[in-house]
Image (spheres, rainbow, N blue to C red):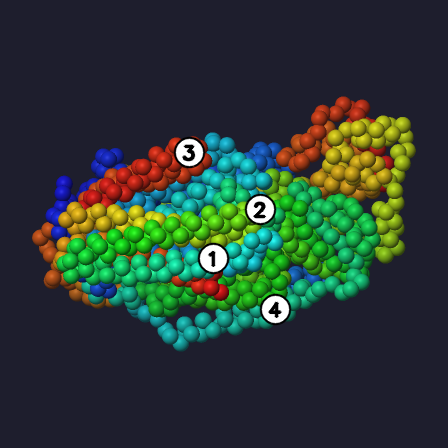
Amino acid sequence: MPRAALHGLLALAAAPLVIAALTACGTTPQTTLEPTTESARRSLWLLQFVFWAAVAVFVVVEGALVYILIRYRRRRGDGLPAQTHGHTRLEIAWTIAPAILIAVVAVLTVPKIFDDAQAAKPGDLTIQATGHQWWFEFVYPDLGVVTANELHMPVNTSTEIQLQSKDVLHSFWVPRLRGKLDMVPGRTNKFVIRPEVVGTFQGQCAEFCGTAHALMKFTVVVESQADFDAWVQRQLDDRTQPASELARTGETLLASGGCVACHTIRGTDAQGTIGPDLTHVGGRSHIASGVLPNTTDGLRQWLQDPQAVKPGNRMVIPSLTEDQIDALVAYLQGLT
Amino acid sequence: MATLSANVPDTRIFSGTAWSWITTVDHKRIAVLYLVTSLGFFLVGGLEALLLRLQLSRPELDIVAPDRFVELFTMHGTTMVFLALMPLSAAFFNLLIPLMIGARDVAFPRLNALSYWIYLFGGIFINISFVAGGAPNAGWFGYAPLTAVQFESTHAIDFWAFGLQILGISSILASINFIVTIINMRAPGMTLNRMPMFVWMSMITAFLIIFAFPAITVGLILLIFDRYLSTSFFLPGGGGDPILWQHMFWVFGHPEVYILILPAMGIVSEILPTFSRKPLFGYAVVAYSGAAIALLGFGVWTHHMFTVGLGPIADTAFAISTMAIAVPTGVKIFNWIATLYGGSISFKTPMLFAIGMVAMFIIGGLSGVILGSPPIDSQTQDTYFVVAHLHYVLFGGTVFGLFAGIYHWFSKITGRLMHDGWGKVHFILMMLGFNLTFLPQHLLGIDGMPRRIHTYPSDMGFDLWNMLSTIGAFMIALSIVVFAVNALRSTRSGEVAGSDPWDGGTLEWTIPSPPPVYNFAEIPVVNSQYPAWDAKRGSGHTGADNPTLEHDPNASHSNIHMPNPSYWPILLAAGLVLAACGLIFHQVLILLGAMIFGISLFGWIEEPAA
Amino acid sequence: MSSPSHVEHEHHSSTGLDNRKLAVWAFLGSETMFFGCFILVMLINKHNTLGGQGQEILDLALTSVTTFVLLTSSLSMVLSLAAFRNGSIVWGRIWLGLVILMGIVFLGGQVYEFSEFVHHGLTPSTNLFGASFFTLVGFHGAHVAIGVLWLTTVFVYSYRGRFKSGSDMWGIEFVGLYWHFVDLVWVAIFTLIYLV
């Protein structure tokens, strides 16, 4: 019986190594193992250092444990073992050894804390990110851009993100770009991101904020300066006029429906600020704060029943007919 | 001294009418009450966990609606911490402290009973919320301003806040009782440095409780005032600060995790020596490192807030203090391993769980060091990495340690041993299931899965680990079934244990199982840390029964006067909780509860103290 | 089943201290943390007035008087215990009665102060200074009120044959310890909030 238990323990000792080997197959959207900024690399480097140090400690200590359990298992005829009470020198040694290891981790950690806390320089691009239940508002104060749920940044440029919240605690987290920082109502937290790789990165709220916390995501698009400038220009342009009859119907529906109470579409009567700005919603990759793709199907699903997609969210609308949905979808898709 | 037949355990501890249980002030019976109730709540918390894991087993499932999910993870945490693990530790405090120090009961037997009844009624009170408008749903940590009345206008948060206050009262009263008992009621010759290590850890835990709970008591008062008196302590609109709540909660919350682990460490510190047949290695260091952990534990709380934006200086200070606390924690582990070294190790079930505790706690401690570095934590905070860490220390550490204790001291309560073979099945299933559940969660965190989410899409890379984790959870559940059946059957038909089935070294093994109501016919005089071993080995006795202990010549032999039972504790507790119900349901209950409280208070005072 | 009236608590204790006294000290240690947290919140919010009433609303003159009264009541408490111990039950009761009276005066002063503040526009919901002040001083006042009720109970019990010379003075000592503690907390509050 003891043998089985010992084998069980040995298997468990090996399991982490096996599992570690199984990981890192491919880049998943929010993995912390594929950093694309210096800050994220800092975090990963430290993680790897401390992790492997921990593995070493694990192997030594658990190994000693397993060895001792086997070596000193009770055998028939065993007498009373030596009644050792302690060994002061040994105890001092094994107090000092971990203290040194911990000190090393601390010494490696502290400078990185300060590196991560570096403030923005004057002239850096500034983005104000405000958390709402359950979507992200993004404002570029120097550029005059107001948008939601999708953030664009020029590559190789330091950008300061200023974090606030309209209601409860949220957290801004794009693992491949940077560790998270909380959005606290009543204060402004700031950090700097300097993306180095062009691409689209996924972010998610990382501080429990209510029923739909799981469904509060956002996208960060890192692009060349030229593409970024083009995007900014697009955002500042007036809204795109509806191109088809169907889209015009949609525009009328939106203007006369309750939508204007919560949403803004610049150039129309929709000036609400409770929900995301929709002026250029057609150009985003996702809707409903990263929950649905910005496709016909996605838009239809959302308009059919927003509560079913994101239970508890603030968008409570009357049932729409299929035709009404068609019209609205056509209109919204046109708002590029 | 009553002579008991060695063949049939005297199960007086389990017999008696319902009334005798309601009015008991006997620490051993109160221990049984705590044990049964806390295991019951453990099942409730476990069921909640199974539902959570079921919902998360695959992407985008719809088994549990989001608003229910949120209630479930809130209640899982609250139930496990306050209604299962702490009271389970209290069961051990109650059973063992008097027995281990050679006392006949705790310092204040009625206060002891009161603590239990307040706990029971408080636990019921919180859980009534499920059918009274909705269970608490802002997490076990209740971060402001999500708990504000504007975001949660139902009574869900009130059940949580009042419930925790009630449970806090129970814990503080019990801790005062144990502090006095340990400091003041030790047998002659038992200096602090001769106390069993479990008693040391219990004493430190009790001090932690009386100094840490006031922080959450005050925090909850401020929260309730924000909700009902229009104050704005945590609301920025009125000049308040949500971060203040976090500070207050974690000033309590961090010592709380040490409150949760120290008793299990104490249990392991008794079991490892027993089944290695040699003393605990480095007794003084283990005791002092426990005290160091408790003290330092008040200086690390902000490591739960590294991502709040407190600034690099605060983050640095608390990162350093957090890493510092790893040292005394690690030292204990080495002392335990050194206890095993050179021993004669027997692998009975209690020992398996104790070893399992050490093995799993090492992993939990290491992941804690990882989390203690703010740049790392900025990625891992609020992800499943933290969930993995906390379960390795609280389940791998505390739960395994507590199960070790249950198997070890089961016979002292019931007179019968739990079946060892099935105990090993429990251990293996639980060990495998536990690791299958929580090891993958480290990876989930690294892969970017936040915590407290009710679902996830299928293209995130989370699928496999979540499925494995759920399978593991059901394995744990199966292992608990094995345990439950074993425990129930063993109480009736387990092998008769005698007073000392394990050749233990401490005083509880020198009296019959179950003990007579007065514990010790004669209070022993103690000369070392392991008086029972000395008595058995020192004087050449080989038998486990009837060791020769010195007895206090001045102790009275004629009447052992035990405290009388009393119904005031249960009434006082009922009055208190009824008044709390009144705050939520109907104001007239406040009056009624206060009256019952008042009458019980005077009844208690008038009743002669035993 | 009644026990003998003189139940001997002659248990030898490992420290020589009475169990009950040790328990009360542990309890007061916990209460220190409790009040410490309230005081800390007050200190954090001392200037958090949102432009409304703040520290300037505190009436130092009135509060100095009530503080003096409370401090004197502690002296009276000491004298009461000494008198009871000495066998002078009559004087014991007189000093005890004075403690109760002074406690009531203190409470009266608090009630007056609170109503004046509300009158002048400071309530718990006005700003954080108000919220913290009313909470801290309110809880302290509640402790004083409980103390007054307790003292009254002890006073009544002194007419029922308790606290005869040579017998168990624990009932007086217990309320005395509590009363001195509440007084000390007030000294801290008065110093940190009113004087500084």
**Looking at the image, is mark 3 or mark 2 earlier in the sequence?**
2
Could you say whether the residue bearing mark 3 is in a helix, strand or loop? helix
Q: Are marks 3 and 2 in contact (CB under 8 Å)?
A: no
Residue carrying label 3: B587
Q: Mark 3 belongs to which amino acid?
A: Gln
Specify the subunit that label 2 lies on: B
- B252 or A187: nearer the viewer: A187
Quadrant in which the C terminus of chain A appears: top right
Residue A326: percent from left, percent from top: 81, 27
Is B495 positioned to the left or the right of B213 in the image?
Answer: left
Q: Which residue is mark 1?
A: C59
Q: Position of residue B556 (x, y in %)?
A: 11, 56
Query: Which label is found at residue A110?
Result: 4
Going by the numbered disc 2, the residue's amino acid type is: Pro
Using residue A217 as the reference point, say whether residue B248 is left or right of it: left
Determine which of the numbered discs, if any, sits on residue A208 in the image.
none
Is residue A214 at all visible to an observer of this figure? no
Q: CA distance from mark 1 to mark 4?
A: 48 Å
Between residue B538 and residue B46, name the one nearer to us: B46
Instruction: From this view, report whether residue B341 is shown above or below residue B393.
Output: below
- What residue is shown at x 46% (from left), y 47% (from top)? C115
In percent of width and height, residue A187 lies at 64, 54
Density class for disc 4 (Cα within 10 Å; few <14, some 14-19, many ≥20) is many
Discs 3 and 2 share one subunit:
yes
Q: Position of residue C63 (x, y in %)?
A: 42, 58
Up/down of A104 relative to A311, above or below: below
Q: CA distance from mark 2 to mark 1?
A: 34 Å
